[in-house]
Amino acid sequence: MNIVVAVDWQDQSQSALQEILDFYKPNELTLVHAVDLGALDSPPIAIDRASYQEYERAKRRFLDQAGEQLRQLAAQVQQDVPVVKQVSTAGDPETVILQVVTSTAADLVAVGHRGLRQFAEFAMGSVSQLVLLHATCATLIVKGTPKKPQRVIIAVKGPDDAERIAAWLLAHPFQRPMELLVVHVVPCPPFAFLTGEHVVKSWTQGAAASAQQLVDGMAAALNGPHYSATGRVAVGDATETIARGLGPRDLLVVSSHGRRAMHRMIFGSVSHSLVHRVEGSVLVVR
């Protein structure tokens, strides 16, 4: 398995590396630190030679520190990972990370999440948000402190989601057996307040029965040496139920349909909302 881990000056990026090694045993690991130099990247035009040289020294110090950080992290994992690569360069972080994902043909990219609210992320941007929107491979958004993983919740919307996630999990199993809970949330019917209770109950029961077949079928497909899976159906708001109503979990797995950022902002996305709402890490499968 080929994994890219984005690293920066924040502790959360080191948590991303630790969480990756808790879940997986990669064949190849690429650590990438893209240093955003800000004002140092474009010194003023009207500047004397001595000041320009100081700009250059400051830039070099930042890059040297980033390189040293990667060397230290690589030394910590080299005994467990056959191939460890390091990419340290100046540039726009999300652009550099996405370029490395493409050039290494990564199966998974992991980035730390600093906890910006959804509107703030759209207005100001965030590396994790932009990587999630534009990466061509599965994306692990790491939140909180890594702990020994045991329980994973998989949220599926329909057969396409179930097939996509199951195929990815079977192709890239966790390094230790894991308990999986496959969940589908049946929404309340639209305009329920205009219909009678009998209509609402009938619609919900029919949808729940169909959903139970979906989650049970996915659980059966996943059960084996790597996973112990069960299915559950709930009724209500999907985001709230998955984020708050299913008990503790070490990881949430969802599927992304790759909608563009503006379409996502206007029409919303359960998987996108869950990245912001859940307390733990989220794996988004494409």
Image (cartoon, rainbow, N blue to C red):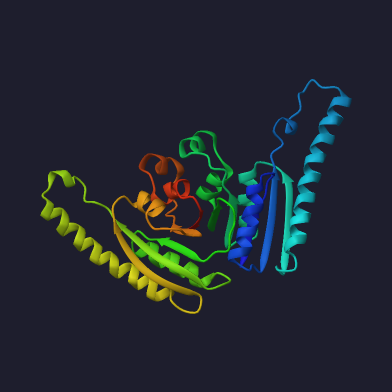
Q: Position of residue 203 (x, y in %)?
A: 17, 57
Of 272 and 15, nearer the camera is: 15
For residue 209, which quarter of the picture?
bottom left
Give the number of callouts. 0
* Residue at x-position 36% and y-position 42%: 267
* Residue at x-position 38% and y-position 44%: 268
Q: Is residue 204 visible?
A: yes
Q: Position of residue 138 (x, y in %)?
A: 53, 59
Q: Is residue 277 left or right of residue 72?
A: left
Q: Position of residue 251 (x, y in %)?
A: 50, 59
Q: Is residue 185 left or right of residue 202?
A: right
Q: Residue furthest right?
A: 50
Quadrant of the rendering where the N terminus is positioned: bottom right
* Residue at x-position 57% and y-position 43%: 114
Q: Is residue 245 left or right of residue 132?
A: left
Q: Residue furthest top?
A: 46
Q: Position of residue 271 (x, y in %)?
A: 42, 52
